[in-house]
Image (cartoon, rainbow, N blue to C red):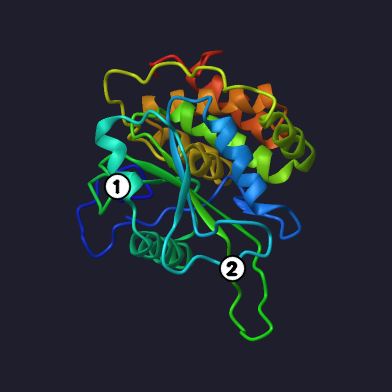
Amino acid sequence: MTDDHSYHNAKADRLGKKTDGQAFDHELESSREWEQTLDVLHHLFLQTWYYIAIAANTNGGMFTPILKNSINLKRTKQEIPTELQTVLKMRISTFGDLDKQIERKALTSGNKDIWHFRTKWKEFPEGTSIIAIQQRPLWNLLSSTPTFRKAFIIIDGQAEVQNQNQAMFLISKVLHNQEFAEKSFKSIGKKAAPPEAKPRPRTKTIYTGRPTGELVLLLKEAFGIHVRTLSVEEKVALGYYFERLKRTGEQDESHVEIWDKLKKHFKTEDLKKGEH
C-alpha cells in the first residue's frame, strides 16, 4: 500500500515513501451527527460507479460506544464486482491495523487524501483505494485518551483521478457544509433509489502520478522547479482538478494563479489534453 501512487514492495512500510501535504480536511465537527453523516455519504456515493462501501467503527446514535469486536459494513453497494467482494469480509483486526498504519505514517510523513493498495493486503484487493475520515474526539472522563469515531470509504481500484477528485469534493461538502448535509439526509427517504450510476469501466486504469492535492502544494511552494517534474498524466489530472474547483465554486486566488501559470507554461487552454 502506498501514498505516492508508486509501487512499493517493502513489507515493513506498506504506506510508502514520504510526500508532503493534504488538500482536504477529513474531520467532522464533534457537534455534528456522525451516523447521519455516514448515511448521507453512502446515499450520495451510491450514485457513483466506483463506490464500494463504508467501513465504520460505530453502529448507532451519537452516544453509541466505539465497536470493539466488529466493524459496521452495513453501508455497502448492492452490486459489487466479484474480485472486490472480499472487502465485505473485513475483520476488526484489519480495521485496527489499517488505522494504526495510517496514524503512524501521518505522524512521520504527513496525512494524505487517499491511500492506495498497490498489492493485495488482507481483505483488500490490489488497486483498491480508501479515504479515511473521522470525527473530532469524544473525551471520556475516565480516560486521558480521546476516542475517535472513524470510517474508511472504500473506492474501486479502477477509479481514475477525476473520480477520486469527485469523491474528495463530495466528502468535503458533506463534512463541512451542514446545511447541504441535512438537506441531503431529509431527501434520502423520499427517493425509491438513487439514479443509476454509469457502468464500471471494462479495462483497469490506475493513476500512477502523484496526488493532485500534493502537486498543488508543491507548485505553490516553487512553481518553476516543480512544473518541470510534471508528467503528462499529472498535468491532465490537474486539469480535471482545477476545472472541478471552478465548477463547484471552491477555487481561490492561489488556485487561479497556478492554473493560469500551468496554461501559460504548457501553451494550452485545456490542461486535460494528453500532451506536453
| N-terminal-most mark, 2 or 1 | 2
Quick one: label 2, few (<14), some, or many (20+) residues within 10 Å? few
Residue 275 in percent (x, y) is at 38, 16
Left or right? Give the position of 48 relative to 261.
left
Counting from the top left corner in percent of width and height, residue 90 is at 34, 53
Could you tell me residue 107's position as x and y percent? 48, 67
Instruction: Report the front residue among 175 and 33.
Output: 33
Q: Quadrant of the C terminus?
A: top left
Which sits in the foreground, 229 or 199?
A: 199
Numbered circle sitting on residue 124: 1
Identify the residue under disc 2.
65
> Residue, x 28% and y 62% (percent of image)?
13
User: Secondary structure beneath disc 1?
Assistant: loop
For badge 1, the amino acid type reads Phe
Q: For this view, does 53 lie left or right of residue 140? A: left
Helix, strand or loop status at disc 2: loop
